[in-house]
Image (cartoon, rainbow, N blue to C red):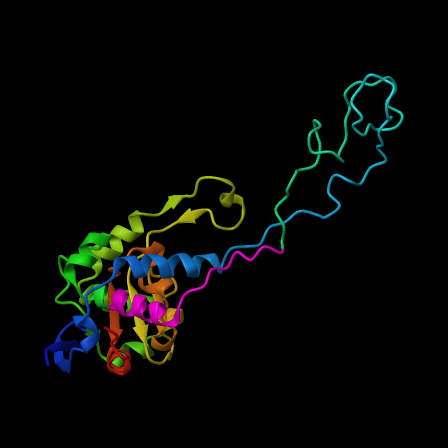
Amino acid sequence: MEKINIYDLDGKKKGLIDKPEIFSVKPRKDLIHVANNVSQSKSKQTQGRDIRAGLKNISEGWGTGYGMSRAPRRKGSGFPTARNVGRVPFAKGGRRTHPIKSEKVIGKKINKKIKKLSIISAISASGDKYWVLKRGHNLDNIPELPLVIDDKIQTIKKTERMYSILCNLGFKEELLKIKKSRKIRSGKGKVRGRKYKNKKGILIIIKEDFGIVKASRNVPGTDVIMVENVSINNLAPGGVSGRLILWSQSAFSELNNFEVLI
C-alpha cells in the first residue's frame, strides 16, 4: 500500500501513513454534478401565491346587452373605462392563470449508492493534482496531495496561529489569492447582510474540535468540517470537484472505513 507523509505544525515531515484505497477511485464528474444539484434543491425556499390572490374585490360582470365584454368590472367606476379587475386572467391587471403554489415539492431525490459514489469521487479528486489545479487552486508550494497534518492542529484556538500554520504548509499564495478575490456582490444582496463575496479556499477536515473551528472562522475562504459531516457541498462547491483539502491525521484514518464501490 502506498505511503504518504504526515506533517507537523511547522510544515516538517513527522511520519508516514497508509494512503486509503478511496484515492484510487476514478472521479465521476457526472455523479458529483447530480449530487450537487440535489443538495442545492433542498436549500431553496418554497414560493407560492395566496389562493385568494386577485379575488379580493367587489368586481362583477354587467352581463349581456351592452355590446361589451362580460369581464368583471370594479363597481363605481362609471362608464366602462377598461378598468377590468382581478377575477379573470385574460383582463389587464387580472390574476395569473396558473399561479405557482407553495405545495409544489422542489426538493430532488438521489439514490443512496449514487450519493455515496459522488462523495467518494469528490474525495478522490481532491487527492489528484490535475483536478485540484483545474479547479483553480495554487499548488506551487504544496508538498503533496493528499496533505495530512498532525492532530495537534485540532487544538489551535488563535486565528493568528492558524494562519501561520497554513503558511508553513505552503498555503500562503492560496490564502493571498483568496483574500484578493473579495468583491462586492451585485444585486440586492448587498443590503441583506451579504455584501461581499469570496472564492472558496482550503477545506480542513478534522475528527474532533478543540478550538480549531473558531480559530479558522476569520481565515479567508477556509472551511472546517468534521469528517462524519462531509458533504458534496463542502467537497465540491458549485458542483466543481478538486477542492484543496487539509486532513487531520485521525480524520484521514477514518477514510479506511469507506467501502469503495465499483
- The answer to whether residue 97 of the structure is visible from this angle is yes
For residue 107: magenta?
Answer: yes
Residue at 82%, 27% in the rendered image:
73
* Quadrant of the frame with the C terminus: bottom left
Q: Position of residue 205 (x, y in %)?
A: 31, 72
Relative depth, front residue between 225 and 124: 124
Would residue 218 be counted in the magenta stretch? no
Q: Which residues are magenta?
A: 103-123
Q: Residue at x 73, y 33 (%)?
A: 88
Which image quarter: residue 161? bottom left
Judged from this view, the residue extending furthest toward the left is 2
Which residue: 21% across, 74% down?
Answer: 22
Is 108 placed left or right of 168 in the picture?
A: right
Name the one closer to the observer, 176 or 82. 82
Q: Nearer the viewer, residue 11 or 114?
A: 114
| Residue 76 percent across, percent down from the top left | 89, 25
Looking at the rendering, which quadrant does residue 167 occupy? bottom left
Task: Specify whether 105 is left or right of 253.
Answer: right
